[in-house]
Image (cartoon, rainbow, N blue to C red):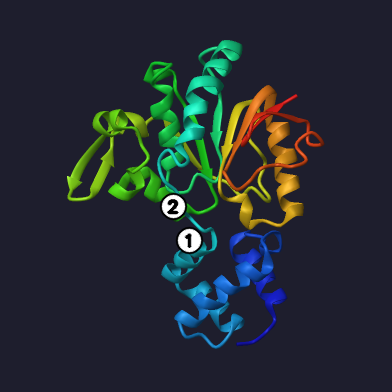
């Protein structure tokens, strides 16, 4: 395989606007080399040429690149704290029209989980989640709303009963009324403008793949996107050690409040 990974990163950016310089290079290069070998291409240039001419390969590549792993109510203890403390406090401070952004939402498990949780506090017609991801393919899957039973393992039984229907063995369809409360948009955390006026931003289990410099820039932009006393909720492997420098307080691990 040819070794000009720098040129390959430039080619990928021109095609996808995904900046591979922001990802941990050793880890990402290994993933990409594996995919190229799987399809029996001689090197990066040949692979890029195929990406330009083969839309199915292009979709597979973007999906592979953006590392989509998600599930409903991932880390249930954190969702319990969200229910018992964070959501009631946000509603008490800001009223029923709270603005929530699920960033890097993958296949929709997270924004749909947020809608279901919010039904404990608000009528459905007052709930709206903005959900974004860089990968159009996973956004399409999210809009379809079909999930394997394994994705629902951590979801409270009450939500499974009320909001899901098993359409074939082991495959569940989420209720249309939940889907309607989520607005999906394509968004690149590394280059696009951020959504402003947010009372809570949820971005979990994606920034672990970014360089430290990219993470710091994203955290700064998240802080700017939040209203004062708004909340950033991150993944269980993504504690922000310098949160004070970034204008956050931390009421509990994985939750950061804008000062």
Q: Residue, x 68% and y 37% (percent of image)?
A: 222
Q: Quadrant of the N terminus?
A: bottom right
Q: State whether residue 148 appears in this view.
A: no
Quick check: marks 2 and 1 in contact, CB under 8 Å? yes
Q: Residue, x 56% and y 48% (percent of image)?
A: 205
The numbered disc on residue 138 is 2
Separation (CA) of disc 2 from disc 1: 7 Å
Where residue 17 appears, as percent x and y from the top left, is: 63, 59
Where is 245 relative to 149, above or below?
A: above
**Residue in front for this viewpoint, 12 or 54:** 12
Question: For this view, does 18 lie left or right of residue 130?
Answer: right
Q: Quadrant of the C terminus?
A: top right
Q: Residue, x 68% and y 50% (percent of image)?
A: 191
Q: State whether residue 166 appears in this view.
A: yes
Where residue 177 appears, as percent x and y from the top left, is: 32, 28
Where, by quadrant of the figure, is residue 8 drawn? bottom right
Where, by quadrant of the figure, is residue 164 drawn? top left
Where residue 43 appears, as percent x and y from the top left, is: 58, 85
Where residue 194 appears, as percent x and y from the top left, is: 66, 38
Task: Kindly state the secondary structure of the residue where label 1 is placed.
Answer: helix
Question: For this view, does 259 lie left or right of residue 101?
Answer: right
**Residue in front for this viewpoint, 61 or 165:** 165
**Residue in front for this viewpoint, 76 or 178:** 76
Where is 145 relative to 26, above or below?
A: above
Q: Residues within 10 Å of mark 2 (few under 14, many from 20)?
A: many
The numbered disc on residue 20 is none
Q: Residues within 10 Å of mark 1 (few under 14, many from 20)?
A: some
Task: Kindly state the secondary structure of the residue where label 2 is placed.
Answer: helix
Provide the residue designation for mark 1: 63
Where is 42 relative to 203, above or below?
A: below
Question: For this view, does 242 lie left or right of residue 28?
Answer: right
């Amino acid at each position: 395989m040819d070794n000009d990974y720098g040129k390959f990163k430039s080619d990928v950016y021109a095609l996808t606007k995904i900046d591979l310089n922001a990802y941990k290079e050793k880890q990402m290069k290994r993933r990409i080399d594996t995919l190229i070998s799987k399809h029996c291409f001689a090197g990066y240039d040949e692979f890029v040429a195929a990406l330009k001419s083969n839309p199915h390969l292009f979709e597979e590549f973007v999906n592979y690149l953006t590392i989509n792993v998600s599930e409903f109510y991932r880390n249930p203890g954190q969702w319990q704290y969200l229910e018992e403390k964070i959501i009631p406090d946000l509603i008490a401070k800001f009223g029923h029209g709270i603005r929530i952004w699920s960033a890097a939402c993958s296949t929709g498990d997270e924004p749909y989980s947020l809608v279901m949780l919010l039904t404990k506090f608000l009528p459905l017609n007052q709930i709206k989640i903005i959900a974004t991801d860089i990968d159009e393919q996973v956004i399409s899957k999210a809009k379809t709303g079909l999930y394997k039973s394994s994705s629902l393992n951590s979801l409270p039984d009450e939500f499974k009963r009320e909001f899901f229907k098993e359409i074939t063995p082991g495959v569940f369809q989420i209720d249309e009324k939940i889907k309607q409360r989520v607005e999906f948009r394509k968004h690149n955390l590394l280059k696009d403008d951020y959504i402003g006026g947010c009372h809570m931003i949820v971005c979990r289990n994606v920034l672990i793949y970014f360089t430290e410099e990219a993470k710091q820039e994203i955290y700064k932009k998240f802080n700017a996107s939040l209203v004062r006393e708004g909340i950033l909720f991150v993944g269980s492997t993504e504690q922000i050690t310098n949160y004070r420098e970034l204008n956050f307080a931390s009421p509990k691990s994985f939750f950061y409040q804008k000062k």
